[in-house]
Amino acid sequence: MKRAAVLALATLWLAAPASAERLVVSLSNHRVAITSSFTGEDLVLFGTIEPDTPRGALRDNYDIVVTVSGPRQTYRTRRKERVLGIWVNVDSRQFINVPSYLAVLANRPISEITSPEIARRQQLGLDNFILTQRVGADFADTVREDPFRVAFISLSALKDLYGEDHKAVTFLTPTVFRAAIPLPSETPTGTYAIDVKLFSGGQLITRANSALEINKAGFEQYVADAARNQGFLYGFATMLLALLTGWVASVVFRRD
Amino acid sequence: MQIYLPIADLPVNVFLLLGMGLAVGFISGMFGIGGGFLMTPLLIFIGVQPAVAVASVASHIAASSFSGAISYWRKNAVDVVLAGMLLVGGFIGTASGVWLFTALRRMDQLDLMIGLSYVTLLGIVGGLMVYEGARAIMREYRGVPGMPRAPGSHTWVHGLPLKMRFKRSKIYVSTIPVLGIGIIIGFLGSIMGIGGGFILVPMLIYFLRVPTATVIGTSMVLTLVTMASATVMHAATNHLVDALLAFILMIGGVIGAQFGARTGQKMRAERLRLLLGLLVLAVGLRFAYSLVVQPEDLYSIRVVEGGI
């Protein structure tokens, strides 16, 4: 009887954290328009940690990991080697349907937030995010030290498209936080998924999702769409534009 | 002032682009060439993908050659029949060039191919021009009169069959080399993003003996049509033509060309040729350097469309 009570108490204590808190997140802007003057922008995500029940208890140590992933794309990473004195693309790997943008934002290093085991299972951080490669006929992620994987991440990081920042999430109060999502100038357009995970004491407590839409707007949108969908007409229009410019120049600068 | 280029997908400074257009336009007006061989490398240098640069420069050249062609047309310095025959070859060349461009891009060898073509072509043409130019100046320096070619001199080209008379240029040559030259120019133009004026003019003079009265005007018409069709074909097959980028370059280009033309008229032909040769050679060497020297990053990424 007594043992059963202890067991019941223990299970209650163990089970309680799993649903004791709720995450509420909100984005400063759900739609970002890329216009001709777009040179990058910072979005802000606000969130609060609330007790699930009105009188639920809150802990005092929370960690937040935000993963923002952009529209999926297939990429090929190529490696140059010297062949007959010149540098030639020799080897390549295909990364199938991987995010074109990937930002991992946290309030402290992921290694301090949770164990490597959980970090891997929850795909926390660039090292743990699954980037599927085509290996022969198979599709699989490789080891994190794989040179093509490392190169793919570092080249994307160079354009600020991939990044990990463990200072980007700041707690305004112990339960209210903000995260800065950096959108670089070369931000790809499309739908972005935002995944917010709440940790405490190394354990995942709850998570929340949000989304973000990035579109080319106005003239940019028009040109990009036309080029993709109406290739021939677009080319024809560009050609006419060229002829018009040439003709105007010959009229303006006519000397005879 | 930064502006976001919709197809190249990167922000650039408008004034930088305008300045590049002006500078290249100035040079092209001075030497009577399209200037693609300078513009394409410059764009690659500021970070535009080689494929987008090649495809967009085509329309820029179309604009500058159109304004040139109009003024030569007014002076009645265009051989329409010759231009038409060259164009038949030009179309075949452009279409096969665009096809090869697409295929090479799929095999990840496009950038290498662009680099290699630049080294080979600019190296040879630039070298020849410098050699010829230097020799002409040396001759002049020593006081030896130049050796003007006799107007009736014949080469092996004149022995080919299927001859045709081009009245405006007063030549009677086989259509085979005419078509061949058209094919070569169209092909190179669509792969390298050059109009080819700087190779076309010497070819027309040396192989076909086209007189100076019609050679530049005719070459401009050919450049115009091949580049205009390359624009349409690149846009339709590879979706890589950045109209905004091209438009900014065009504006700078046509203005620069006017000032360049004025400067060019004040210079002596031999000096001009030597200078152009040095310029061509320098661009070729720059490409050779980037092929031979170990790149900063051995890895590069390319977006794969449709899983290819």
Image: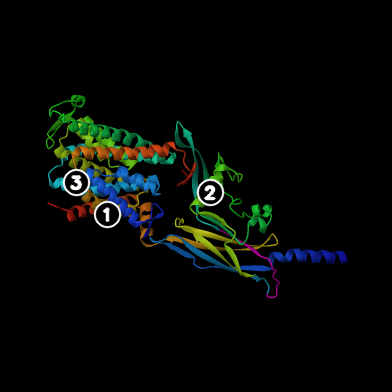
- Which one is nearer the viewer's eye here, A138 or B142? B142
Q: Is the magenta stretch mostly helix, strand or loop?
A: loop
Local packing at callout 1 (Cα closer than 10 Å; few below 14, some 14-19, many 20+) is many
The tag on residue B251 is 1
Give the foreground label among 3 and 1: 1
Q: Is residue B65 visible?
A: yes
Q: What residue type is labelled 2?
A: Ser
In magenta segment, residue A191: no
Chain under callout 3: B
Q: In the figure, is residue A107 to the left or right of A30?
A: right
Residue at image mark 2: A154
Residue A77, percent across and down?
50, 43
Count of marks placed on residues: 3
Q: Are marks 2 and 1 on the same chain?
A: no
Residue B193, percent across and down?
32, 43
Q: In the figure, is residue B125 to the left or right of B269?
A: right
> Marks 2 and 1, how far apart in space?
38 Å
Q: Which amino acid does label 1 sit on?
A: Ile
The residue located at (22%, 46%) in the rendering is B29
Tell me if label 2 and label 1 are in contact, CB under 8 Å.
no
Q: Element at badge 1? A: helix
The tag on residue B220 is none
The tag on residue B69 is 3
Displayed quadrant of residue B139 = top left
- Which one is nearer the viewer's eye here, A208 or B214? B214
